[in-house]
Amino acid sequence: MHRLLLQTKQPIFDPSRSTTYKNITCTSRHCSQLSSATSTTPRCSTNTCVYGVRYGDNSISQGFFASETLTLTPSDVFPKYLFGCGEKNQGLWNGVAGLIGLGRDRLSIVSQVSSKYGNYFSYCLPSTPSYTGYLTFGTGGRSFTGSSLKFTPLLSKSKGPSFYYVDIIGIKVAGKTLSISRSVFKKSGSIIDSGTVITRLSPAAYDALKTAFRQHMTQYRMAKPFSIFATCFRVKKNTTLKIPSITFVFGGNIEVVVDSGILLQLRPRRPAWHSPEIVTSNMGIFGNAQPKTLDVVYDVAGGKLGFGYRGCS
């Protein structure tokens, strides 16, 4: 499910202090819509609709399905906005006040505010927390008018109504195209997901990338696998790494060069470790580490996804 984490130091939402908050009943048509939005059949508790969702990183959220007045700007107010009020959240939730659902399903915020903004949104995720990114609804943001934007088609959502399916057709390392058949990508299918940190590739695609990447990193000592990461290096402190570029090629021969998000610095007790932020998966997932600093533009109405450089630092 396409999502963005909301980091905050403010108190979490307290429905008991709201005069416009209402739980959705089990008999409501909105309750039945949760099946497609969450890929999980909703439950019922004393005639209150209960949602449950599990994400690709095994984080889970469960709670009451409800409606509330959503205010984005003083003039942009959306009554009866549908959302999940989490009661049980497990996983990567430290310091997180909630999630914004940006999927294609009709219950996502993108669909629910489309009367004002259309089915358009864009964002840029900064390279580090010390920089500022953005999230924009509608076409008023500068990213939609950027001359550097290159678009690839969004594929049919029939496989999953919440997902943004894209066509990855190739990968380059240091400018050289890897010998990966297009059928490898088509068989597994690929989505882009702002809520998945680590990019996932099918085993055949990952093995080809791993082999090529290691060939360009022979000056560094290999380390044992760490957690889900299979390609790790032992690097001395203050070492300047020379890392080969990685380029993802999307449908329409759109090339997206990954400048950041190639290596993840891990710090066990000793020594420092570095691991590629790409692992294996049955489905290809272009995670949020790779497009950092890029404008990522969703023209859902037009059925296309755009990438632009230097969206943020």
Image: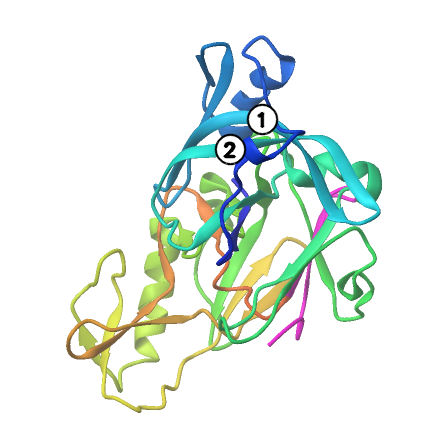
Q: In the image, which disc is placed on residue 85?
A: 2
Q: Identify the residue at horizontal 65%, vertical 32% (top origin).
A: 68
Quarter location, residue 24:
top right
- Given contact means CB atoms under 8 Å apart, are the residues at marks 2 and 1 in contact? yes
Which residues fall within the magenta stretch?
295-313
Q: Is 122 in the magenta? A: no
Q: Identify the residue at horizontal 56%, vertical 75% (top origin).
A: 131
Q: Identify the residue at horizontal 62%, vertical 12% (top origin).
A: 28
Q: In the image, which disc is placed on residue 66?
A: 1
Secondary structure at badge 1 equals strand
Residue 29 or 151: which is nearer the viewer? 29
Q: Is residue 23 above or below residue 220?
A: above
Residue 75 in view, yes or no: yes
Q: How is the image coloured?
A: rainbow
User: Which amino acid, mark 1?
Assistant: Ala
Q: Position of residue 45 (x, y in %)?
A: 43, 13
Q: Identify the residue at horizontal 52%, vertical 21% (top origin).
A: 35
Q: Could you tell me which quadrant the C terminus lies in?
A: bottom right
Residue 265 or 192: which is nearer the viewer? 265
- Spatial CA distance of label 2 from label 1 is 7 Å
Residue 40 or 97: which is nearer the viewer? 97
Q: Earlier in the sequence, mark 2 or mark 1?
A: 1
User: Which amino acid, mark 2?
Assistant: Cys
Q: Is residue 87 above or below residue 207?
A: above
